[in-house]
Image (cartoon, helix red, strand yellow):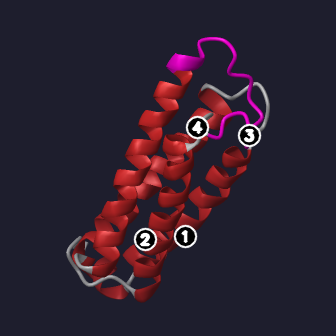
Amino acid sequence: MLSRTPLWLSIVAIALLGLVNLVRGSIHFFAPDGGLKTIAALDISQEQAIILSFIGAVGAGQLTMALVDFAAATYYRPFVRPLLLIHTAQAVLAVLLLFVWRPLPQPVPGQWGALVGMVLIALVMAIEFSRKDDVAAS
């Protein structure tokens, strides 16, 4: 049952994900280079306008997701459980993209953060959805 009251651990995890999304989204949206040169040391000299537009759009999505995360953690707690599923799926896709499907020409900080984040989010989700009442209801 997705609308069940979430564990405190899950609420804190969603709030922390909101903070991560706020920081990453702010960098990708507001930094002149979107963090691509200054943080990731990527060469964006070719098609810079297109690349910065795309990373800005990613930042806009992250900022919006931060608002959703904070709203769920503070006001709409029944949405914390579905958000754990969404964040887990998002993290798995990011890891597949960064390590398998379209790896970058060099390792970037977010690449390893995505891998660690995927494991931690999946762990919190497993704890949340393995609660006795959930297992008995299925």
Residue at image mark 3: 38
Among numbered discs 3 and 1, the one appearing first in the sequence: 3
Query: Is residue 63 found left or right of 133 in the rendered image?
Result: right
Q: Residues within 10 Å of mark 3 (few under 14, many from 20)?
A: few
Query: Which one is in front in this view, the residue at disc 4 or the one at disc 2?
Result: 2
* Pointer 2 local density, CA inside 10 Å: few below 14, some 14–19, many at least 20: many
Q: Nearer the viewer, mark 2 or mark 3?
A: 3
Does label 1 or label 2 sit earlier along the sequence? 2
Q: Residues at badges 3 and 1 in contact (C-beta under 8 Å)?
A: no
Q: Nearer the viewer, residue 27 or 103?
A: 27
* Residue that mark 2 sits on: 14
Which label belongs to residue 96?
4
Please state the extent of the stretch shown in magenta in the rendering: 35-50
Residue closest to the eye, 54 or 2: 54
Whether 44 is among the magenta residues is: yes
Question: The residue tagged with tag 1: helix, strand or loop?
Answer: helix
Disc 1 crowd, CA 10 A, few/some/many (<14, 14-19, 20+): few
- Name the kind of residue labelled 3 in the image: Thr
Q: Nearer the viewer, residue 122 or 39?
A: 39
| Three-letter code, disc 4 | Leu
User: Nearer the viewer's eye, disc 1 or disc 2?
Assistant: 2
Is disc 1 in contact with disc 2, using a CB cutoff of under 8 Å? no
Distance from disc 4 to disc 1, alpha carbons, whole Å, reads 18 Å
Name the chief secondary structure element in magenta. loop
Q: Position of residue 106 (x, y in %)?
A: 79, 30
Earlier in the chain: of badge 4 and badge 2, it is 2
In space, the residues marked 2 and 3 are separated at their CA atoms by 28 Å
Determine which residue is flagged by label 1.
123
Looking at the image, the residue that sits furthest to the front is 32
